[in-house]
Image: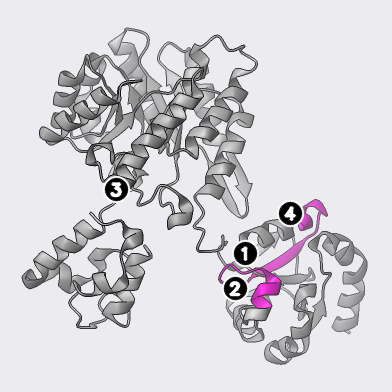
Amino acid sequence: MVKITKLSPIQIYRLLPKTNCGKCGEESCMAFAVKLLNLQTTLDKCRPLVEDPKYRKNYEELRKLLKKPVKDVYFGPEDRKIVIGGEYVMHRHELTLLTPTVIAVEIDDSMSQDEIERRLDFVKRFKYEYLGFELRIDTVAVKYVSGDSDRYMKVVEFVRERLGRPLILCSVDPRPLEQMKQLLRDERPLIYGATESNWERMLSLCREAKVPCTISCPGNLDMLFSLVKTFNKYGVEDLCLDPGTFPKSIGYTVKTFTAIRWLACNEEYELAGYPLVGVPATVWYTDVPDDVKPLYESALAAMLLIRFADLLIMRSDKAFTYLPIVILRKNYYTDPRRPSTVTPGLKIVGNPDEYSPVLVTCNFALTYSIVTSDLEKGKANAYLLVIDTEGYAVDVSVAAGKFSPDVIAKFLKESGIENKVKHRVLIIPGKAAKLAPEIEEKTGWKVVVGPLDSSDLPKFLETKWPEILKKYLQ
């Protein structure tokens, strides 16, 4: 297996049909090869390669060349599945990271009904707006601790109905899982987990129900890889690996995670090529003071997230535990080759009416976030046109011709803003001031140059907008 970062477009092109048929949506097979290498398209888009028997050998060879060193595993029904793993490289700067770490909150079946409901509400309500994105907790891990299989089954069913998301079922005792085989087949949860002592029954269960399984061997990599090999031998390949999370031995924990990912990505060791599971929740089973545990757990989760954990199982029910983690995850899994963007469109700030100001900005996520935040803090009511500048900031997109009069004119027509306001006045960023005359010519709107810094926008709108509106409505 050749690392994708060492492949060239020519190596891929030689195995393509070279007909330039355009069925993949690209102008040529070479263009398709380049996009494959940059992870901007998928091999199955080449229909001749997939459908024509004469290309079958090339197709299989390309699949092997483009195989991910870390297998992607999904759990949950097809229409709402959660994917974990599926990475080509260890570090984001080598190419990019594809699948953000999944975050799950632990619920155990010894908790009271009120506590379970409270935790479910916490997971469902947790959200944070960041750079135009809504950051959330992904799911719940239901842990078997009561020793009562019937109780566990009831809790799992309750959580499934209330949460409506794919679940992780945590039980080293196979009995409660064996009693809910139909649910396993229907919902395809992630099972946690198989161990040195229960692997035979867990293997049988996973083969029969066709569900993914986590293999857990804390502190014993030889046994971990031995069990992976055994599961593979019997046809179970949807696996996750838990090498152990040790809150009192963080150095060992991080080194172990790093070693496994290194083996997968750089040594082509297939038994290591599976998603890694970190369990910061183990903090809660130590003698760390209770008031410190939420912070300790957050710090441990952050270390594991940037050291290759594809799934984190956590226990805290405090928002401050998760906030830095979801922000770190968003930043860490941003493609370094492409600016972070928000979807272009007409955005509403406050409660604007037909005489409210209309502003325009770029779709660079940080710029958009700062502008909207400044407007909201100033309690402004306005329409904000976010145009597609391919993720460039205003000054850069002006220089690159992305923040152009033609683009703005087209967007004004398509946004429907002309039907929402009775004026034809557009406020542009101060850094785009030189474009004002041409924007007026292209759009037919009067253009007012706003402040250089968006923090001055609220005061600008409060003091200047009434005068501007009066002037141009006369």
- Real-space Cα separation, disc 1 to disc 3, in angstroms: 32 Å
Residue at 57% of width from left, 33% of height from top? 322
Mark 4 vs 1: CB contact within 8 A: no
Disc 4 on helix, strand or loop? Answer: helix
Residue at 78% of width from left, 58% of height from top? 375
Which amino acid, by three-letter code, is at mark 2? Thr
Which amino acid, by three-letter code, is at mark 4? Ser
* Residue receiving disc 3: 69
Which amino acid, by three-letter code, is at mark 3? Pro
* Direction from residue 324 to residue 200 in the image, left or right: left
Mark 1 or mark 2, earlier in chain: 1
Q: Which mark is residue 389?
A: 2
* Direction from residue 127 to residue 15 in the image, left or right: left
| Mark in the foreground, 2 or 3 | 3
Q: Which residues are magenta?
A: 374-398
For residue 106, above or below residue 257: above
Which amino acid, by three-letter code, is at mark 1? Phe
* Residue receiving disc 1: 364
Near mark 2 (Cα within 10 A), the count class, few <14, some 14-19 or many ≥20, is many
Expressed as whole percent of the image width and height from the top left, the position of residue 101 reads: 44, 41
Disc 2 on helix, strand or loop? Answer: loop
